[in-house]
Image (cartoon, helix red, strand yellow):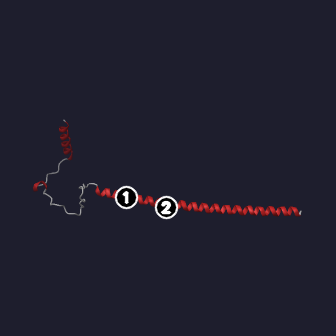
Amino acid sequence: MSKMNQLVGEMYARLNQIADSERALVRDLAETIRSVDLQVLQDVRAMAATHGGTRRVILTELESLADCIGTFPTLGKPTRTFADPPARPLAPVNDGQAPRAPGDWRQAVSNIEDMFKDYAA
């Protein structure tokens, strides 16, 4: 019986040793998973920051484009802003005559179409 108690004690010690090594492996795995999670989080934050910077650059370019729409810049000279006064005084409209009465836009379109028909012929 003492031999049996000795074998059970050895088996118990071996099981405790295996359990300790398994616990150490589980702790190592948990630490590795935590470090990978932190690395993924840092990568996602870096991508988000890069994306945010790119979006800001694109938005700035779009705003710049929107500001330029409708203006005709001259080559080699800075464009005039709306706050700048005109270079020369504006000429009077219709040589100082009274403004024309408003017309029908449909008639104006028809006149333009007729004009293009004359050129096409």
Q: What residue do we see at 17% from left, 48% from top?
A: 103
Name the residue tied to disc 2: 45
- Percent position (x, y) of residue 121? 18, 35
> Is residue 12 left or right of 78 when viewed as pictured?
right
* Amino acid type, callout 1: Leu
**Eyeballing the image, is 36 above or below 108?**
below
**Eyeballing the image, is 104 above or below 96?**
above
> Is residue 72 left or right of 36 when viewed as pictured?
left
Q: What residue do we see at 88% from left, 64% from top?
A: 2
Residue most toward the right?
1
In the picture, the disc for residue 59 is: 1
Residue most toward the top?
121
Along the polypeptide, which appears first: circle 2 or circle 1?
A: 2
- Percent position (x, y) of residue 12? 79, 63
* In-front residue for pair 101/44: 44
- Percent position (x, y) of residue 18? 74, 61
